[in-house]
Image (tube, coloured by chain):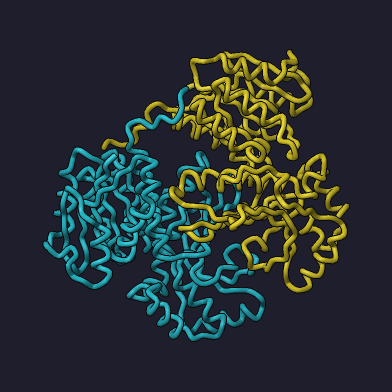
Chain colours: A cyan, B yellow
Amino acid sequence: MRVALLLIGFGHVGRRFVHLLEELRPALDARGIEPVVVGIATRRHGSVFDEAGLDAAQVARQVASGEMAGPSSSEQPAHALIAQLGSLSAEVRVLVETTTLDVRFGEPATSHVRAALAAGAHVISANKGPVAHAYHALASEAAAAKRRFLFEGAVMDGIPIFNLVRETMPGVRVLGFRGVINSTTNHILTAMEHGEAFDAALARMQAEGIAEADPSLDIDGWDAAAKVSALANVWMDARMTPQDVRREGICAGDAARVAAAVAQGRRMKLVGRAARTAGGIVTSVGLETLEVSDPLGGLDGQANALEIDTDILGRVVITQRDGGLEKTAYALFADLVEVAEMTSEVVFRGDR
Amino acid sequence: MRVALLLIGFGHVGRRFVHLLEELRPALDARGIEPVVVGIATRRHGSVFDEAGLDAAQVARQVASGEMAGPSSSEQPAHALIAQLGSLSAEVRVLVETTTLDVRFGEPATSHVRAALAAGAHVISANKGPVAHAYHALASEAAAAKRRFLFEGAVMDGIPIFNLVRETMPGVRVLGFRGVINSTTNHILTAMEHGEAFDAALARMQAEGIAEADPSLDIDGWDAAAKVSALANVWMDARMTPQDVRREGICAGDAARVAAAVAQGRRMKLVGRAARTAGGIVTSVGLETLEVSDPLGGLDGQANALEIDTDILGRVVITQRDGGLEKTAYALFADLVEVAEMTSEVVFRGDR
């Protein structure tokens, strides 16, 4: 099955995704999936579209190496490219959305998702914005268009947390969750436990490309709040935005609290939470003191963990010990396989 | 879609499964799945078969309450019932296998699985025996028969650990794993940390129905070895049996080691492991001293956890904080949904 891909956003995650399509070719071949990258839109190097297919890995290497010979031939806006993708009506079409996001507003990713669904394309996105800000509307639009809208990379990088609940826990009701889901703040808190100053730890995270360019998105809790909103929207039908999350960040002044916790054999973690209450769904992001034996308390550095409280299975925890951008790219790959498998007209793995 | 179910084995797990079919009816209705229990074979109360359908929940209540009015009308052997199930050729047929197992030999479950596949039925089983002893052969037989053989309840009760890797991690290669996967020994080790004697703790586990009737299956490490074998067979194509696992159990003489670990702020856990080496796949079950911040080190009582080492996603841990038989019954339910969805002739969730 030929699957036409348009990549809007072509940073580290988008480029790594393109390389994964080559590295994991056997897994695609085994499923009869033939991805063809027909378009790429970059932030600074223009865009390119060829319905016959591009050599995306070559473009990725050129962009990564700083050669500008990449997709610079045109400056078409993303929406024009999405319309071109939509015109390829004879095949499965997928928008791969990885633009830079302001999690406070969810744009431009949300507009891209909406336009692609309207144009008849499926959408896979590593962006938390659309699902944090507009999940209910976008899911309705996807259902009406008979298209998939998947976003496995939005929370916990490549760990298939949404898929876990959707595909493997039929009939299970999520009662709430709590998680350490922002890598930058967990890095900084871990560094502060070892005596490093807040500002120095943050600067190191930025130098290593782990922290957002605008550090307030991480340290003021916006990234975690967007993830809480996304999870609550998908699992608990919360119909909320990140602005609705009670939000507390971390700052240099927390050093004394961090040291006091360590002195007691405990650890401070920035925890995102959601719970069903008589008054509705209550969500928050804030510093909590945890035991080291707590599944969220033993996490170092980029590790993330999410504890899901369910009616039938009790508390289930999924932990990502080794995070990173390359895992987020894998989430797009897993979403692509899911779209392709569910789009097959006949999935006939067994006779009756 | 009508799905005919034959239950071989009707203990706590089988009876709880029957009640779940009622409690989770909305999730089945939403998927167009209409389960009909056509046969039940119990260990002590005989068997019953009616292709028009039984009131299984009523039978379950009768058996549980000690009224013998349950399935006592005949004493047909399991294989005769499986043949009857196979004769219902017009519909989807599923064997639900939950017989009492000797994990050292994998029978009678393995023979039941084999017979059902040969008779044209799908198989869902909470038994670790068939997958620990004969996974490669049974998977081949299932593929040849175009039937599914699923066993989510074999390891970690209801946590969809096999489904997690099979359905949500396409292209990912499992390099190895380690886990605390036997509840009885974890209970006993936790009790010994609090000063309880080994024999007293074991007796309590047996009284509570947590330990196997033959305690050697738990405390000598056979249960954990069978789970290691099952996981290695499915994820690493190991083609092994529990006898191939280097195996160490726990005993009263471990009290000093447990106390010494606690004195150091550490904990003793019975850990099952598998790793790929130059000499092949190496597996073991044995006591290890862990830090409390280790994802396996913080587990109390019936909690289980499994850390999967992968090529693309690094180390992923899934933790079940609240175990129990009712979760195992849910695993059968999830397997039933998977069989029904994959058996649908057309799964058409989206146009191209």
- Name above or below for residue A324 compared with residue B52: below
- Residue at image x 75%, y 40%? B104
Q: Judge from the rendering whether residue A169 lies leftward or rightward of residue B242; answer left or right.
A: left
- Name above or below for residue B42 compared with residue A273: above
Return the x and y of residue A252 as percentages of the image width and height. 47, 83
Return the x and y of residue B248 as percentages of the image width and height. 77, 54
Return the x and y of residue B215 as percentages of the image width and height. 82, 44
**Is there any visible trace of residue A228 in the rendered image?**
no
Q: How many marks?
A: 0
- Residue at image x 78%, y 24%? B44
Dividing the image into 4 quarters, which one contains the C terminus of chain B? top left
Farthest residue to the front: give it. Answer: B279
Observer-nearest of B255 and A231: B255
Quadrant of residue B5 in the image? top right
- Name above or below for residue B322 compared with residue B43: below
Observer-nearest of A316 and B146: B146
Observer-nearest of B82 and B280: B280
Q: Judge from the rendering whether residue B255 lies leftward or rightward of residue B114; answer left or right.
A: right
Quadrant of residue B194 in the image? bottom right
Q: Judge from the rendering whether residue A144 lies leftward or rightward of residue B217; answer left or right.
A: left
**Is there any visible trace of residue B59 in the rendered image?**
yes
Return the x and y of residue B249 as percentages of the image width and height. 79, 53
- Residue at image x 26%, y 71%? A65
- Name above or below for residue A191 compared with residue A15: below
- Residue at image x 71%, y 35%? B106
